[in-house]
Image (cartoon, rainbow, N blue to C red):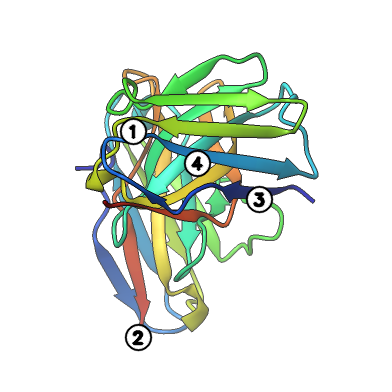
Amino acid sequence: QLQLQESGPGLVKPSETLSLTCTVSGGSISSSDYYWGWIRQPPGKGLEWIGSIYYSGSTYYNPSLKSRVTISGDTSKNQFSLKLSSVTAADTAVYYCARQFYYDGSAYSDCWGQGTLVTVSS
Amino acid sequence: QSVLTQPPSVSAAPGQKVTISCSGSSSNIGNNYVSWYQQLPRTAPKLLIYENNKRPSGIPDRFSGSKSGTSATLGITGLQTGDEADYYCGTWDSSLSAGVFGGGTKLTVL
């Protein structure tokens, strides 16, 4: 069955770039049926949608993060990645990768990774 | 401040029914489908409802969803202690061209 697993540093210094990778097994990021995206959750707070990438390379980003976010895909490794630049303590959160379905007004995430905590601190 | 508005908390007794509301606008709920997620303590969110009222395989029919205008509702019947969790609504916002979530509702089964 489909599984997603986040990986990357758990601690990032302020002003540096947060980099995470999501490895997909049991499915292909080259599928035209789905997007692949990132969602985060600051400690004790709610969910925040970060952005998504389609197999073609097209992307959607949260307008509030757009200037700092890049999502890319590596079909040869069946992975997709998140880069968030110029981080501050406000970017401390659990970061989830997820398979996402967008079509004709329908948008949902049907399979999530377990999440990885990234702390921004010097 | 979340784009979608949910009550911070709801509670009900075991076996009872509870509803959780999610309010938005014409740019999100009003013109797009709504999904609902359950987040048990210390776990990743899980899709409960998609396209307003559809349940993924394995989700019991105790969970239901509905939408009217710019609001949506999640209903849970036959409450169990295992239903204690945070519940989030989500949808697409056509003006933002982005996904949006509600702030989450904590369900307590008394």
Q: Are marks 4 and 1 on the same chain?
A: yes
Cα separation, mark 4 vs mark 1, equals 12 Å
Q: Earlier in the sequence, mark 3 or mark 1?
A: 3
Which residue is denoted by mark 1 in the rendering? Answer: B69
Report the Cα–Cα distance between label 2 and label 4: 28 Å
Residue A44 seen from this side: yes
Q: Residues within 10 Å of mark 1 (few under 14, many from 20)?
A: few
In the picture of the structure, the residue carrying the numbered disc 2 is B110
Q: In the rendered view, would you say B12 is above or below B101?
A: below
Q: Residue at x 51, y 18 (%)?
A: A59
Residue denoted by label 4: B52
Q: Earlier in the sequence, mark 4 or mark 1?
A: 4
Q: Residue at x 52, y 40 (%)?
A: A20
Q: Nearer the viewer, mark 1 or mark 2?
A: 2
Residue at mark 3 to residue at mark 1: CA–CA distance: 23 Å
**Label 2 SS:** loop
Residue positioned 51% across, 26% down in the render: A71
Q: Is residue B73 visible?
A: no
Judging from the image, mark 3 belongs to the subunit labelled: B
What chain does mark 4 sit on?
B
Q: Position of residue A97 (x, y in %)?
A: 55, 43
Furthest residue to the front?
Answer: A122
> Which quarter of the image is occupied by the N terminus of chain B?
top left
Labels 2 and 3 within one chain: yes
Q: Position of residue A15 (x, y in %)?
A: 27, 35
Instruction: Tell me the distance, in whole angstroms, between the alpha carbons under discs 1 and 2.
Output: 32 Å
Q: Residue B95 in the image: x percent, y percent?
A: 32, 18
Sequence-first tag of 2 and 4: 4
Mark 1 / mark 2, whichever is N-terminal: 1
Horizontal arrangement in the rendering, residue A56 relative to residue A93 (left or right): right
Vertical position of residue A9 compared to residue B14: above or below = above
